[in-house]
Image (tube, helix red, strand yellow):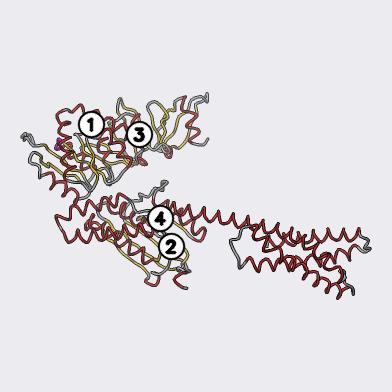
Amino acid sequence: MSSKSDKIRVLIVDDEKLVRDYLRRVILEKSDVDVVGEAGDGIEAISKVQELSPDIMLLDIQMPELDGFGVLDFLDAPPPTIFVTAYDEYAIQAFEVNAVDYLLKPVTKKRLFDAIDKAKIYIQRKELWESKATRILNHVRSQEVSKIAINSKDEVKLLSVEEIFWIEADGDYASIHTANNYLFYKKNLKILESRLPSDLFLRVHRSYIVNLREIKELISSAAGSRYRLKMVDDTEIPVSRRKARKVKNKLKI
Amino acid sequence: MKEFILYVVVLLIAALMFAFIFQSAGNVYFLQTFFISVLFSFAIGFINRALLELIFSRVKNLETYLRILFAAPLLFIGTFLGIIVGNYICFLFFGYYPFPSQSIVKFGVGIGFFSLILGSGFIFRERSHELKKKAEIARLEASIRSLQAQINPHFFFNSLASVQSLIHENPGKAEEALAAISEVFRYSMRRGQKDFIELCEEIEFIKQFLFIEEIRLGDRLKIIWDIDEELINCSLPPFLIQPIVENAVKYGVEKRKTGKVKISIKEENNKLNISVSNTGRAEVRLVPEHSLENIKKRIEVIYGKRGSFEINTNGEVKIEISIPRQYNKSKEG
């Protein structure tokens, strides 16, 4: 890996082997581009990016488990990315302004080559890509998800949001508590709050988000002005004064 | 029944009115006058009603004023007939004719006008009922149309991308796949406009759909069919089963790398029971606009309480639909 070739190193991410085969075959017709790897799902994509650090990523949006946006969201510094999508009006909206380029399936050779040529600019000028990536992520992060990718020991894992009991702020990061363990999540509570389904989760405190279904009881202090939540795992979580009413509303008290 | 009671009440009120008129004209026995009034009122009322039913059951979709125009001569004829019948019955009971033959024309015309007013009232009422019903049916049809699923656009573009790759690697298979995609597209366009299709058409469509999915997913997909052959001519709304199969493939197979989908269609107590099960976790969250939610709503709108939609997630995911066993009427005739 360390031997530097002059060729642009491409990673292809798509859940369909036939599509990967096609993209690889067409890309290899260009003499200055090399396909260094393929991934068939989001998790594999994350580990391939970390392992190979490609120059460009061709990224399918709709994939089982973790989708293309989830991959970008997880990576701290994703490579310049060309999106590949079958049909997704919402996604196209996000790309139109911010993407390096996006390709609609079935992909033509000319469009693919054009996109790679465009991406070359961003390989040299990383900061241009970074600002685009940030904007795409801001757009993406306003959408609720049902699963999030999490680094657990050495591997990337997918966690269904339903499995989460409660989340605690940990500096700029978060620790997510589930039935049997807690996981470290390298994003802050604010990002998590906007991505978790609002019918299921509530920010009850500057440092805490709870899963409403996993609350055992609402405990009020002797004076009656302070509240704590007892979760199913018997952890007690403080409720900030400002959020008390909202908590009661959500719990229909 | 409600309509009939209303009619009788209106006739009784009319009779009461006439009884008072007769009473004030100097007739002594109120009960007798009232009885006679009721008699005439019912005789005239029912004969007129019967005549109206007779023509309007044959001539439909007439404007209200045309209906009244048609009804007018009938109502006069009916009124005369009613008076003659009432007269005769009265003669049998009391031995005299309340309407002497020389004054029948005079009274007949008067009561005829009265009948026409009452009759027009009923015609207005019925017409507005009819229009309301029509509007309701139109509303239901519109909501069924709007719920009518179309084939998922992702599916089209993804399968075209697969064919694009196949053209190079396996031209024979690419040809077959293109034909299957065309079939699915054709079904999607044509059947989307129909309210009901035969089960065999939907099954054929699902088979073409699965053929394409098998190309995309390779040997990761295993399908088990269990269909009672006697049922293939049953009629059902189009796109009722395919989205469930698509969902099963999506969550049962695509997400788990390999998986099984079982499609079973049986009859029980004159109901068509359709079940689609797939291996894998229960991923089915019924969010709005989700294809499954859409099917549930369509069954509700089309069949009401006679249909059902259930999701079972014990172990494997199983979706069960039950709808009345029906055949397309136009085919039978």
Q: CA distance from mark 1 to mark 2?
A: 53 Å
Q: Amino acid at mark 4?
A: Asn
Q: Earlier in the sequence, mark 2 or mark 4?
A: 2
| Residue marked by disc 3 | A142
**Is residue A136 in the magenta section?**
no
Label annotation for residue A76: 1
Q: Nearer the viewer, residue A73 or A137?
A: A137
In this picture, which residue range is highlighted in magenta?
Answer: A51-55
- Specify whether disc 3 shares its chain with disc 4: no
Q: Residues within 10 Å of mark 2 (few under 14, many from 20)?
A: some
Give residue A49's quadrant in the image: top left
| Residue marked by disc 2 | B196
Q: Amino acid at mark 1?
A: Asp
Q: Residues within 10 Å of mark 4 (few under 14, many from 20)?
A: few
Give residue B114's quadrant in the image: bottom right
Chain under callout 2: B
| Residue marked by disc 4 | B312
